[in-house]
Image: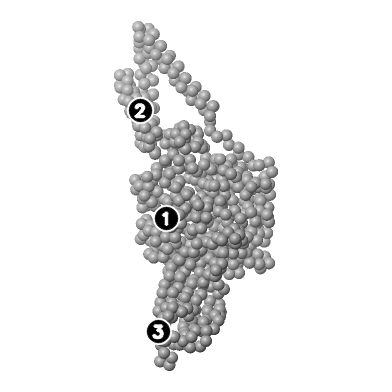
Amino acid sequence: MLLLGYVGLIALAVCMVSGLAVTWQGLFGIHTTAVLRYIHLISTLMTLAASVPHILISWLRRRGSEFTRPAARWLAQSAIACGAGVWLAAGLTLAYSGTKHKNEFPPDYNLMYGKNRPFAPSLARTSTNGAFDARSLAGSASCGSSGCHKQIYDEWQPSAHRYAAMDPIFQGIQTVMAKQNGPESTRYCGGCHDPISLFSGTKNIFVEKLTGLDGFNEGISCVACHSIQKTDIQGNASYTISQVSEYLWQWSGPHTAGAAARDFLIRTWPTQHNHLSKRMYKKPEYCAACHKQFIDQEVNRVGWVQLQNQYDNWAASHWNKKGDARATVECRECHMPLVDSTDPAAGDSTDYNRSASDGKHRSHRFLAANNFVPALLHLEGGQKHLQLTERWLHGEINVPEIRDKWSEGPIVKLRIEAPGTATPGEKLPVRVVLVSNKVGHDYPTGPLDMIQSWVEIRVEDDRGQTVFSSGKRDSRNFLEPGTFLFKAEPVDQYGNLIDRHNLWEMVGVRYQRSLFPGYSDTVEYNVLCPSGGPRAPSQAVGDTREYSVRATSPGTLRIAATLHYRKVDQFLLNYVMGEKAGLTSPVVDIASATAQVSVARAGK
């Protein structure tokens, strides 16, 4: 009995000290130490295991003695106090047990594809196959307001994931789709662009902008991404999402008592929080759910057509060394590079090249090629994000994690091949060679009907006069005819060009050009070396342009070539936003090169 008493006393002391330490961390830290939490739990159980038999044996031994009555009173008082505590906890639970979610479709929700496919033609689904209250998938600000994930939240703020639903280009095209095919058809887009609205049933008739107010400013929210429990590689948002269990006062605003209580609960008992998806998105297959797209008969009324497909591009490329993580470059290693972190999410012992104490987390900027919308919408942190995006497109972002596996230099290399000398009056063959250097999928990638990447070339003489040019933009920011262009030209069933991103009418492609990872492409130009003839108009033949200019004294021709990129072509931008808006998508110079050719005298 004496031994039980000492064990119970020691366990109680450990329980109190560890409990105070965990409480302190929960109130004033950003996380609690797992070891301390488990010590507190185990010591509590040990205190009970030792104290209860100790008290019971003592009672039985001293039963009938002078100590019995005071001991009985003490035990009764302790039992009453414990019972009051239990009833108080139960009463608080009944008084406030969290948000009462309304997981119901609107009364007029159209199940046009059947009751078993309420979100079709998107392949996204909920774990219940029913609606989720929009509030249960929104509230990303609460992740960053507590001091826990503020760094990650600030990275997410200007990212393409965050503005996926508020992108005015997306909004404009979605409106056209709804007018032509009905609002239900826009569910095709919702799984990837606007999951909160999709799963709350607001991709429906009479809903303004086809989006819920809770989801409009969040796009792919923190919870929407981290609640995904299952994916496959079909694409078109082929994932299953669950509704996470909430902490009390989950959605309380910053600097409130509710928020303080919520943060304390999360930090001191993070088990429920840790049920959010944290491991499955390490795999590229997680990204494939949205970064792979197709049109099928349900959408175009004709048949199946493959659209953008970053996943299969990557899977078939030299970046994927199946079964060898040390030689493979995966999606997250490029687009979510490790950054120095004070976040509770810092550290990871499950990666071959990381540790639990490495002081880093994966950036949630998702840097890629979206260099237009953050400035247009004046997103918080947008200017910095655009600067980083431009550096990314230049290939200037250093990623130490994959330095030994990645290439150096720009994302696409460019070089000029031309003879060392040219003769007046003869054609000068110029070749521009483009090599996909450090892109994990096709370059460019994404919706190639609206993305443009093109070569601009200019040949000048010693006096700075243009001898030859191609790839210029006019005063309205349109490209001149004959420009060498990476792009796709989809068509509808009647052969009409799909130029308004009206992909729901697409049945095929009449032209497509892009660079597969590690591959090259070449554009050839025939430049007529100055020969003294009168200046003639340019003539375009395929990828060839010809000029004739007045003779210059023998000297040097200077050749400059640049690969440009812009996210949205001018026609689509004018169509969606209106030409009077005066908007144009920023142009980034991906790579450039120069060369010189000596011009000899005729006959020499």
Q: Which residue is mark 1?
A: 333
**Dot 1 or dot 3, earlier in sequence:** 1
Secondary structure under tag 1 reads helix
| Residue with the mark numbered 3 | 555
Residue 297 as seen in the image, left or right of residue 359: right
What amino acid is at disc 2?
Answer: Cys
Quadrant in the picture for residue 268: top left
Residue at x-position 35% and y-position 9% = 67
In space, the residues marked 2 and 3 are separated at their CA atoms by 89 Å
Quadrant holding the C terminus = bottom left
Answer with mark 1 or mark 2, whichever residue precedes in sequence: 2
Residue 59 appears at what percent x and percent y? 37, 13
Q: Are marks 1 and 3 in contact (CB under 8 Å)?
A: no
In the rendered image of this protein, does residue 504 appear above or below residue 592?
A: above
Image position of 152 (left or right of 110): left
Indicate the secondary structure of the residue bearing disc 3: loop
- Residue furthest to the bottom: 603
Say how the picture is coloured: one colour
The secondary structure type at the circle numbered 2 is helix
Q: Quadrant of the N terminus?
A: top left
Between the residue at mark 1 and the residue at mark 3, the CA separation in whole angstroms equals 49 Å
Which is more N-terminal, label 3 or label 2? 2
Amino acid, disc 3: Gly
As drawn, 404 above or below 531: above
Q: Which mark is residue 15?
A: 2
* Residue beneath the point at 55% across and 53% down: 167
Q: Looking at the image, do the residues carrying marks 1 and 2 touch, with CB atoms under 8 Å apart?
A: no
User: In the rendered view, would you say 289 is above or below 465?
Assistant: above
Question: How far apart are the two marked residues, 1 and 2, measured between alpha carbons?
Answer: 42 Å
